[in-house]
Image (cartoon, rainbow, N blue to C red):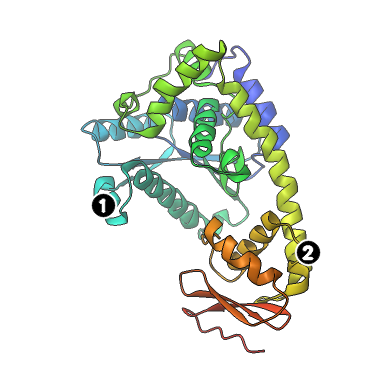
Amino acid sequence: MIEEFSGQFIKLKNNCLKLHLFQDKTIAIIALSGGVDSICALYFLLWLKERKVYDDLIIIAAHLNHSIREEALSEQKFVENLCEQLNIKCHVKTVDVPSLADKRRSGIEEAGRFARYEFFRELKQAYETKSEFQKYQINIVLGQHQDDLAETVIMNLGRGSGIAGMTTLKAKENELRRPLLILSKSEIYDLGKAQNWQWVEDQSNQSNDYLRNRIRHDLIPHWNQILGYDVRPLLARLSNNLEADADALNWMNKKSYDYCIIDQNQLLLKRLKELPKTILKAVLEIWLKENGFQNKTITAIQMEQIWPVIQGEQGNKILKIGDGINFKRIKNRLIFESLNSDKTNIL
């Protein structure tokens, strides 16, 4: 079905094997918007399956109708028809993203991203509960590519992000898989044209109403013109280089947490005092996650309040960091207290 060509899929396959993106007995839930990127990811998975690169690779499509544009229904029909032709099971969900944005008091982009990831993870959980798939790894496959990675680096750089923001798009991240990150948008387009694939064009990608589009259409071309070369592959390389540094830092953060923890709710103060501020912040955030606050982070302002309390020589203190969470300095310990749970910390 898929012809041999230019080596692009071979390059993607070799990268998948190098990074251990998939394994035998995998259910790959492909986020299929109908755009050329997701179509490329879909055909790559089919290519892997045809060539038995992985034993027992099951491909399932997931399409979210955002209810934003008039073309949304026709795009949904396109995806459904394509999946029928390819004999791929397709799950479709419709979400009123504009209403969701109002409810969440967020922008359309953020609300759409939230709805997509919720849908994909709902599907993952549904397949995990099926007895016949208990021995399978379940991955969510996204069609993000090198240009997306470069744009994300710029967006997060503009927000003052640290290493985490520079490495936010990874080829392998929990259940997420992004096999196309080593291909540029133009390479994907060329591949689609050469293979005569059909896809739909999202007209909102042409609108400068969205920050990412302004970066894509205005900032990056101007930057390239000034430098005299395409900056996108270099930004992607920067992200990949920093990812290795982030892995080392995460390893050190976990070691530091293990060094400081007494029990789930208590850290030893004298050992916290030994830590650089960056690692201390990470240790406290690991502590929050271990206590059930997965998405809670310590802000820069909060760190400026926490740092002198930990470094101080004596005195009991209480630090309120929101969501009903208190950090208490008592004697030689820092104690976690959640006012929204039944846990009570008693010395």
Please identify the quarter of the rendering in which residue 241 is found.
top right
**In this rendering, position of residue 47 left or right of residue 93:** right
Can you name the residue that lies furthest to the bottom here? Answer: 347
Task: Give the residue at mark 1.
Answer: 102
Q: Nearer the viewer, residue 270 or 69?
A: 270
Res. 242 in view? yes
**In this rendering, position of residue 196 left or right of residue 10:** left
Q: Is residue 305 above or below residue 5?
A: below
Task: Give the residue at mark 2.
Answer: 274
Q: Quadrant of the C terminus?
A: bottom right
Res. 299 in view? no
Please identify the quarter of the rendering in which residue 331 is found.
bottom right
N-terminal label among 1 and 2: 1
**In this rendering, position of residue 112 left or right of residue 169:** left
Q: CA distance from mark 1 to mark 2?
A: 45 Å
Please, what is the three-letter code of the amino acid marked with disc 2?
Answer: Glu
For label 1, the crowd category at 10 Å Cα-Cα, with few meaning under 14, some 14 to 19 and many 20 or more, is few
Q: SS class of the residue under badge 2?
A: loop
Q: Is residue 111 above or below residue 340?
A: above
